[in-house]
Amino acid sequence: MAKKHRHREGVTGKTVAKHTPIPGLMEAIKDLEKIRGVHSIVPGPIQSPRGGKGPGELTISVQYIAPEGYIRLLAKKGNLRQEIRVVTSRPAETRERIDAALQGKRWR
């Protein structure tokens, strides 16, 4: 029987699930996993500032390409915020594909 590796726990497809995603984010991540050039997707911890909006639509925007070669996305839903790192070997090309994929998309 094969031994289960501890570092592979929480991995689904290309996503390393170290943190609970905000509601609706997993559907969006599954769309991002299909983009050519995406090696892995790592959602960060959820940030919830005081006050703010109530429940709303999930929006995802590209923030920047980090010097380390990953693309930082920011997911927002109501007053919840979550950073998403997209690991790729070709950040500029992959960013263009992500921008195109996110254009006009809405998740609940």
Image: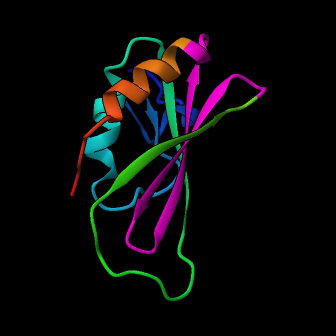
What residue is drawn where x is 47% and y is 20%?
A: 96
Boundaries of the magenta span: 67-92
Residue 47 horizontal/vertical position (percent): 56, 68
Q: Along the line of sight, which residue is nearer the eye, 9 or 19?
A: 19
Residue 99 vertical position relative to residue 59 in the rendered view, above or below: above
Residue 21 horizontal/vertical position (percent): 41, 56
Residue 36 horizontal/vertical position (percent): 39, 11
Residue 39 vertical position relative to residue 80 in the rendered view, above or below: above
* Magenta-drawn stretch, dominant element (helix, strand or loop): strand
Q: Is residue 13 visible?
A: no
Residue 22 vertical position relative to residue 56 in the rendered view, above or below: above
What residue is drawn where x is 39% and y is 80%?
A: 53
Q: Along the line of sight, which residue is nearer the eye, 45 or 17?
A: 45
Residue 89 is one of the magenta-drawn residues: yes
Residue 35 horizontal/vertical position (percent): 36, 18
Can you tell which quarter of the image residue 68 is in?
Answer: top right
Can you tell which quarter of the image residue 101 is in?
Answer: top left
